[in-house]
Image (cartoon, coloured by chain):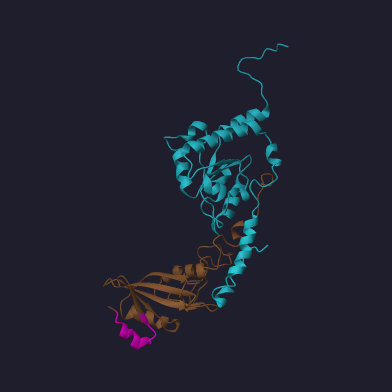
Chain colours: A cyan, B brown
Amino acid sequence: MAVGLPENIFITKLDAAANWARSNSLWPMPFATACCGIELMATAASRHDLARFGAEVMRFSPRQCDLLIVAGRVVMKMLPVLQRIWLQMPEPKWCISMGACACSGGVFDTYAVVQGIDRFIPVDMYVPGCPPRPEQLLQAVMDMQAKVRRTGTVMGREFAIRDMPAGPAPFDSDERYRIEDTRLVQLGGFSAAATSAGRGATQG
Amino acid sequence: MVCLTELQQKFGSQIVESHFRDNRRIDVPASTLLPLLTSLKTDYGFSMLVDLTAVDWLEYDGATDRFSVIYLLLNMDSGERLAVRVPVNLPEAVLPSVYGLWRGADWMEREVWDMFGISFSGHPDLRRILMPEEFDAFPLRKDYPLKGRGERHNFPVITRSGS
């Protein structure tokens, strides 16, 4: 049984070897739209030093990145941009949703703000906080590394099975009630005013 | 100082003046808006349009008109300020554009159009400025719900295996 391996040689699986390498050189794509972006910059700066985890190479081209960090609220005008950036990133790629706004819309429950990016793009890791401390983002990067090492495969088989949206359905039931309520409100007040407020983009 | 009786002689007695603290405000009907503003600029030296905005008075106690459009003017030489307020009602919420008087009105009128749906005839490029072009409501109208009518959820969903 004893097969003598020469020195400096060890045996592992290809999946493990590849994802050990990948997890230690995550290249983040900073999608920073709000105050979380400031914390993201602080995480990469000297005091907290994201380079200790091999993730300091922030590239502003999605073609060179494999970790999308969405830091801040995403408005409905920005969401198609975010989706395009996600699609432009080469495989394998991961996504961290940083902060309350990116995860759920936060306090911005208005017509313009998307209520969580996971409704529209896949998310691997959520970071709570408003904004999260740099330590929390560091923990998320470390957890992300652990997840890559634990579940990663060379050819990305673990991605192919995730064919369901990560987040809740785009239209909650209360959203539907609200659309109905709008029609009731329009019956009151200035009668001439009520009719031409514009048709909703999606009515059903 | 702009004399109110002088303006009333020129543009009719429907012009009303009111004050709030040291702010001076005149209400004018839409029909005399453009000649009045032209006169304020050329004769009275209001060379700067500080702001152009609107208010929706829907369900406001005592309101008689649906919208007010407000022009904040500044005389750069004397420092005098004046607010000109004009009522607008649906369904024909149209005012003459003041782009010809103050170029700065360009984006402000686009913003009022985008948010309130008040259009400005004679504006060279009246497009939406804040909301995306395919948006088809006017969000600052009071009969528009705060959370919208589902526009924020009207996007394709990208799954991990599909991207």
| Of B89 and A58, the residue lying toward us | B89
Reply above or below: A191 against B107: below
Snapshot quadrant of residue B106: bottom left
Reply above or below: A79 against B22: above
Residue found at the far front of this picture: B61
Residue A103 relative to residue B104: left or right: right
| Of B94 and A80, the residue lying toward us | B94
**At 59% across and 49% down in the image, what residue appears?**
A117
| Of B115 and A109, the residue lying toward us | A109
Point out residue A188 in the picture as x, y percentages from the top left corner. Answer: 57, 73
Question: Which quadrant of the rendered structure holds the C terminus of chain A?
Answer: bottom right
Q: Is residue B14 visible?
A: yes
> How many badges with numbers are in the image?
0
Q: Which region is colored magenta?
A: B2-16
Q: Is residue A56 visible?
A: no
Residue found at the far left of this picture: B78
Residue found at the far right of this picture: A1
Residue found at the far top of this picture: A2
Reply above or below: B12 against B57: below
Point out residue A140 in the picture as x, y percentages from the top left corner. Answer: 54, 37
Point out residue B144 in the picture as x, y percentages from the top left corner. Answer: 55, 66
**At 68% across and 40% down in the image, what residue appears?**
A159
Reply above or below: A118 against B53: above
Point out residue B63 in the picture as x, y percentages from the top left corner. Answer: 46, 75
**At 34% across and 77% down in the image, what residue appears?**
B18
Any magenta on residue A26?
no
